[in-house]
Amino acid sequence: MKNIIITLILLLLSNGMYPQETPSWAKETKEQKEKRMEWWTHDRFGMFIHWGIYSLPARHEWIQLYERITPADYRKYFDHFDPDLYNPKEWAKKAKKAGMKYVVITTKHHDGFCLWDTKYTDYKVTNTPYGKDLIAPLVEAIRAEGLRVGFYYSLIDWHHPHFPFDHSHPPTPRDSEERKKENTKRDAKKYQQYMKDQLRELLTNFGRIDELFMDFSYPGENGKGHKEWDSEGLLKIVRELQPHILVDNRMDLNHTDWGWDFVTPEQFMPQEWPTVQGERVPWETCQTFSGAWGYHRDEYSWKSIHQLVVMLIETVSKGGNLLLNVGPTARGVFDERADERLDGIGNWMKYHSRSVYGCTQAPEDFKAPQNCLVTYNPSKKRIYIHVLEWPFKSLHLPGYKGKFKYAQLLNDASEIKFRTQTEEGSHTTETSRENDLILSLPVERPNVEVPVIELFLE
């Protein structure tokens, strides 16, 4: 009976259905983890950059899969990649001006093309017409602007000869039996070692890296999860080389409490602060300006500046971070539509970053007024009311009576008077409910994307 129980436990562990004991190299207290993540939960706003040879067809970063392009036909993009206008200093300055505090760059995306001079493959930027490493100068430029550096690394690799075929592989045989036959020629262990070697390069050759975005797992039949990647082995290398680094949750280690630092809802806004087993967890939503991550010339569903500012506010109001993506062109510049939106966000952040940095979800007793979003800075003891629709003269604050001592518009620090009125008056007297307050607002809406009222708490 004892042997049967041990066998069952081992089986559950292998399937990710039973909590694994924390490895010695991954052990830390809750307080240590919070300290490690402190900069990230303060800064709240980062830039994602998806860039590679898929910027040449300019039809989506997954074009090789979506259009079933063979490796031979996809090679033309490698042979013509020459971003002659690439200026990483400009990129870093644009991120900083927009109010972003960290930048995450795709070192390798699913097509397997590498943006640095790796010694483990010839499928890299230094063998293109451009001929130079793209990552090193960008890392230097990001740090020069006082921003933190993050790397994206794809677990998927459609180019590598030992990446096993599956249903999400561009040149894969459509017949499952044929796929199995072809996969007998591929050694998954060799691909695992390739990833480990490249991660060692990325986390050794470029100095301190603050965030690692590993992307992505799709476990199950004909898919790939933590066993196929050897995710624990990958993470061990990461933690040993850069123990301070923050790692996302896409290596299929969600059955552990040590295999990830934050969750990553993509292209949607959670209804509330995400939880795991009933406990709120750190989270970062990655979003695009349009519908694609890489440069897409003919994509027209671009979000407005107002939508993007509100997205940032809503993310912070639910305790999260926003990683907003730019897809540079094949010549190495940002799309003018991206520049316009970055400038717009930056104009708003210039006057309202206090309502983002160091902020989080407000305590339960500070309900959002009608048509508003609320953020809270616990260290400064301030509430920030983001007014999405400017009301006529008055804004009612539900249950705020006696909770703050001063109010002002954040964009110009002009005083906002407040009052309570619970007694019946004439037909020109506005009344409020008990424990509510009324802010007396200017009739004319402040000329900013989203006006913010700053409350100094008692």
Image (cartoon, helix red, strand yellow):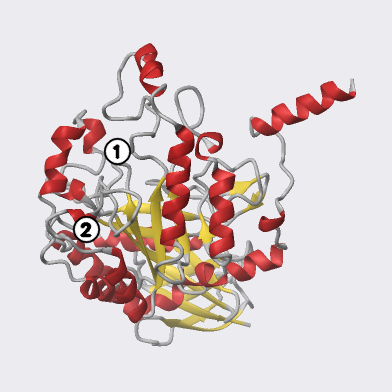
Occupied quadrant, residue 230: top right
Residue shown at 29%/59% (left/top)? 117
| Secondary structure of residue under mark 2 | helix
Q: Tell me the kind of residue under disc 2.
A: Thr
Look at 41% across and 63% down and name the residue there: 150
Quadrant placement of the N terminus: top right
Horizontally, residue 214 falls left or right of residue 79, namely right
* Tag 1: amino acid: His
The residue at which mark 2 appears reads as 126
Q: First in sequence, mark 1 or 2: give its number.
A: 2
Alpha carbon of mark 1 to alpha carbon of mark 2: how far? Answer: 17 Å
Q: Is residue 37 visible?
A: yes
- Percent position of residue 32, x then y: 68, 67
Which residue occupies the foreground of this view, 27 or 315?
Answer: 27
Within-10-Å neighbours for mark 1: few <14, some 14–19, many 20+: some
Looking at the picture, how far across and down is residue 77, in whole percent? 14, 45
Q: Which residue is mark 1?
A: 159
